[in-house]
């Protein structure tokens, strides 16, 4: 241990993924490792973190072991855990850990479990009642009806679990940074929804120029977002309606509009439709197998890609969902 001098000690502490700050017994900061030196990123954040470190350091030197949590509103919001421990010399060691990502992941997990257990209660309860009714039933027609309802509740549960998995996955994952041509995304979505649309008597039209509409991001996530919007447009339209997907440029953005001539959304529901599990008409959504998560997924994906998703709608006339994403600049040779 005698050869373990201060320089080696500093190199070792510097390698930690944790901010470490040493205070002398007079309460003055003596040394900090490089993680602690780079903490904060922007000036304002740096000042607040340093104030909190100083406060904890002084308390510990005065004899109080302390732990505190620093919540910074951002943007982006960040959370730091600051712990102070006394040193034998009379000074203090303060550690600072950025726990933003850890808390976010924990929240996604707890939300997932809470949402799942809450939302599965209804279909599970319905299946239990339907099964009870089925038990004493002898009429073949009624047995068939009850069995079909059990089947549809089971599909609803499966859809709910799948959508929740997808939403949690999107919340957990970082976005892949690949070049995505939105024209290809729209083509693929058109293919995906065409069978259901023609079955329901709804026409799909797409409009875009020949130029590629490039954005930076994750094609699978973008496909999921756009197909949720297009599937909704079909689901909430009546036979004879037209669903249109139009790609255009607006300043530095690529704009995709998904419009329908369907039932529309009442004005008081408009601010709520992006909430998890919110459905305007629960009966209709149940009929169409909706989980109330499609728009949450779409909005999350678009915000992951630094874009915006907005809606305008008129009851009985239809809705327009507008996606704006930053266009990827191509380097001209
Ligand atoms: P769902 O699975 O129920 O379709 P979403 O999150 O995709 O869930 O949508 C939430 C609610 O918003 C739907 O239940 C529906 O009431 C309404 N909605 C979404 N898109 C449309 C649309 N194009 N036209 C009318 N209502 C829509």
Image: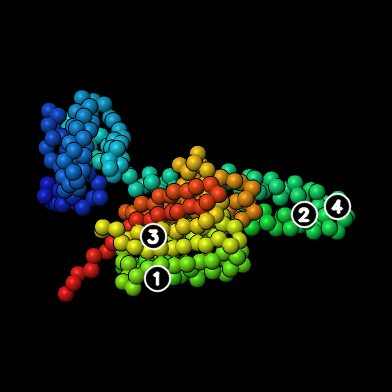
| Residue that sits furthest to the right in the current view | 138
The span from disc 1 to disc 3 (Cα, nearest Å) is 12 Å
> Sequence order check: which comes first, mark 4 or mark 3?
4
Q: Any atom of ligand 1 within 8 Å of the CB at mark 3?
A: no
Residue placed most toward the observer, 256 or 147: 256
Point out the tag, 4 or 1, that comes first from the N-terminus.
Answer: 4
- What residue is at 61 percent from the left and 64 percent from the top? 200
Q: Nearer the viewer, mark 4 or mark 3?
A: 3
Distance in Å between CA atoms under marks 4 and 1:
52 Å
Sequence-first tag of 1 and 3: 1
The answer as to whether callout 1 falls within 8 Å of ligand 1 is no
Which quarter of the picture shows residue 212?
Answer: bottom left
Dot label at residue 146: 2
Residue 302 locus on image (x, y percent) = 38, 55
Q: Could you say whether the residue bearing mark 2 is in a helix, strand or loop?
A: helix
Q: Position of residue 5 (x, y in %)?
A: 12, 48
For the question of whether residue 5 can be seen, the reply is no
Residue nearer the viewer, 134 or 235: 235
In this view of the protein, can residue 248 be seen by the observer? Answer: yes
Give yes or no for contact between labels 4 and 1 (Cβ–Cβ under 8 Å): no
Taking depth in this image into account, of 232 and 239 the one nearest to the observer is 239
Residue picked out by circle 1: 184
- The alpha-carbon separation of the residues under discs 4 and 2 comes to 9 Å
């Amino acid at each position: 241990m005698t050869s373990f001098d201060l320089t080696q000690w500093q190199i070792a502490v510097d390698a930690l993924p944790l901010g470490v700050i040493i205070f002398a017994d007079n309460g003055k900061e003596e040394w900090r490792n490089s993680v602690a030196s780079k903490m904060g990123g922007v000036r304002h954040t740096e000042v607040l973190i340093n104030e909190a470190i100083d406060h904890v350091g002084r308390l510990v030197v005065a004899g109080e072991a302390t732990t505190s949590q620093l919540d910074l509103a951002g943007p982006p919001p960040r959370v730091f855990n600051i712990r102070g421990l006394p040193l034998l010399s009379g000074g203090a060691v303060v550690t600072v850990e950025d726990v933003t990502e850890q808390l976010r992941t924990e929240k996604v997990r707890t939300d997932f479990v809470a949402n799942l257990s809450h939302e599965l209660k209804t279909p599970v309860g319905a299946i239990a009642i339907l099964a009870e009714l089925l038990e004493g039933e002898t009429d073949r027609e009624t047995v068939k009806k009850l069995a079909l309802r059990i089947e549809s509740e089971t599909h609803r549960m499966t859809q709910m679990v799948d959508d929740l998995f997808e939403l949690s996955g999107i919340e957990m994952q970082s976005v892949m940074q690949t070049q995505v041509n939105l024209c290809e995304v729209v083509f693929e979505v058109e293919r995906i929804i065409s069978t259901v649309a023609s079955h329901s008597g709804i026409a799909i039209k797409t409009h875009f120029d020949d130029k590629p509409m490039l954005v930076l991001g994750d094609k699978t996530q973008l496909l999921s977002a756009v197909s949720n919007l297009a599937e909704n447009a079909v689901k909430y339209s009546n036979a004879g309606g037209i669903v249109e997907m139009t790609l255009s440029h607006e300043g530095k953005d690529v704009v995709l509009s998904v419009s329908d001539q369907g039932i529309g959304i009442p004005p008081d529901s408009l601010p709520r439709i992006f909430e998890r599990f919110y459905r305007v008409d629960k009966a209709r959504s149940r009929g169409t197998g909706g989980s109330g998560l499609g728009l949450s997924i779409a909005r999350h994906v678009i915000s992951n890609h630094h874009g915006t998703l907005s809606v305008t709608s008129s009851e009985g006339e239809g809705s327009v969902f507008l996606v704006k994403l930053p266009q990827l600049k191509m380097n001209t040779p």
